[in-house]
Image (spheres, rainbow, N blue to C red):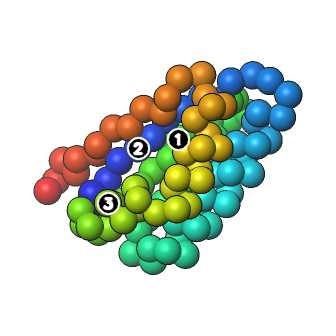
Amino acid sequence: MIRSVAEYTVREGEGELDAVMDAVARFVAAVRAAGPRTGYEAYRRGRTRSFLHLMAFPDDAAEQAHREAPYTGEFVAALYPRCVEEPRFTELLDVLE
């Protein structure tokens, strides 16, 4: 299993947070529909503009398919211009494996 986390903060501005919230909802629904064995959760840190996404892919092929999927490109196009800086991705390793 491949696990990672993405973290980002949405910049201030009229409608920016609402646009990201809508994009996240569409993206998570698309990920879950496309990859039933893929785990994907998105969280907002309280009432802040900071977000955390947890991802779990069954294998490298599933992760690559996710990266290349049209819904991922659409999400990136909606999200990245609204971020204070580009999202940070961190690989998560199970300490018991």
Q: Is residue 42 visible?
A: no
The local crowd at label 1, few if under 14, some if 14 to 19, many if 20 or more residues have their Cα within 10 Å, is some
Of the residues shown, which amino acid type is indicated by label 2?
Val
| Distance (Cα) linking label 2 and label 3 | 16 Å
Q: Which residue is mark 3?
A: 64
Residue at position x 62%, y 67% in the image = 29
Could you tell me which residue is drawn at 79 percent across and 41 percent down? 18
Relative image position of residue 17 (x, y in whole percent): 75, 36
Res. 32 mark = none
- Give the quadrant of residue 66: bottom left
Identify the element where label 2 is drawn. strand
- The spot of residue 67 in percent (x, y) is 40, 56
49 lies above or below 71: above
Which amino acid type is shown beneath numbered disc 1? Leu
- Which label number is shown at residue 5? 2
Identify the mark nearer the N-term, 1 or 3. Answer: 1
Give the answer, above or below, for where 48 lies relative to 41. above
State which quarter of the image contains the N terminus.
bottom left
Front-lying residue, 46 or 30: 30
Label 3: which secondary element: helix
- Quickly name the residue at label 1: 52
- Ranked by sequence position, the earlier of labels 1 and 2 is 2
In the image, is 62 to the left or to the right of 51? Answer: left
- Image quadrant where residue 25 sits: bottom right
Q: Residue at x 85, y 28 (%)?
A: 14
Q: Callout 2 environment at 10 Å: few (<14), some (14 to 19), or many (20+)?
A: some
Amino acid type indicated by mark 3: Gln
Label 1 element class: strand
Precedes in sequence: disc 2 or disc 3? 2
